[in-house]
Image (cartoon, grey):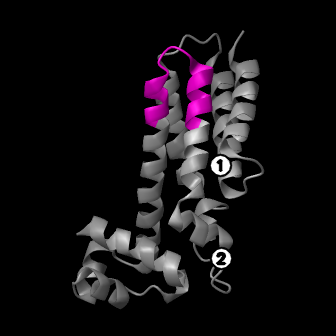
Amino acid sequence: MRERIVGAAVRLTAEVGWSQVTMAKLGDLVGVSRQTVYNELGTKSGLAEAMISQELDRFLGVVSDAFDEHPTDLVAAIRAASRAVLEHAQDNQLLHAVVSATHGADTELLPLLTTHADSLLLAAKVVISERIAPYDLDLDAAHLDAAIDMVVRVVLSHVMQPTAAPADTAESIAWISARVLRP
């Protein structure tokens, strides 16, 4: 039920903007009562967090798949993960609705991806740290953490405001990563 409601909320946000999303409209879309929507997600803020969390899980799944494809070459894994994330971002309805804020002054969700993105950054860094662990790197923990932070922040920056094609950006991120991660 929760996934159906969150999915409907993403579609509705993309179509009409976050400010027009109500628990009653979601209930109607999913075929349940407004109270059922509240019972599943709590408040509208809880709904927003659930939407962002679901999308983050999808993005991190793309990252994990890319690392699985390159188990012995970390830079290739970073290149593939960066490209996959950036390509996924191009077609992401929720991300476009939030970043473009084309629906008037409908920017209530934007802080979840920018100024209040601590949990998003932490989750991404945890996944990257876990995925990097099997690679043989000659870096102490502090420098490895700095490198992971740099890669995550650069990729997220390009997700929010792309400046080139995903393949080109991924190549640049891989080039920087190679300079930092390879002795």
* Image x and y of residue 67, in percent: 48, 28
Instruction: Give, as a three-letter code, the residue at label 2.
Output: Ala
Task: Say which residue label 1 marks.
Answer: 156
Residue drawn at 60 percent across, 12 percent down: 137
Residue drawn at 49 percent across, 32 percent down: 66
- The local secondary structure at tag 2 comes to loop
Alpha-carbon span between mark 2 and mark 1 = 18 Å
Q: Quadrant of residue 95?
A: bottom right
Q: Quadrant of residue 117?
A: bottom right
Q: Quadrant of the N terminus?
A: bottom left
Position of 9 relative to 69 (above/below):
below
Residue drawn at 22 percent across, 84 percent down: 31
Q: Quadrant of residue 19?
A: bottom right
Kindly identify which numbered label has been placed on residue 72. none
Q: Residues within 10 Å of mark 2 (few under 14, many from 20)?
A: some
Tag count: 2
Q: Which residues are magenta?
A: 64-81
* Image x and y of residue 32, in percent: 21, 84
Residue 31 vs residue 138: left or right?
Answer: left
Instruction: Give, as a three-letter code, the residue at label 1.
Output: Leu
Q: Quadrant of the C terminus?
A: top right
Residue 103 vs residue 58: left or right?
Answer: right
Residue 183 vs residue 18: left or right?
Answer: right
Kindly identify which numbered label has been placed on residue 101. 2
* Image x and y of residue 29, in percent: 31, 83
Residue drawn at 68 percent across, 57 percent down: 160
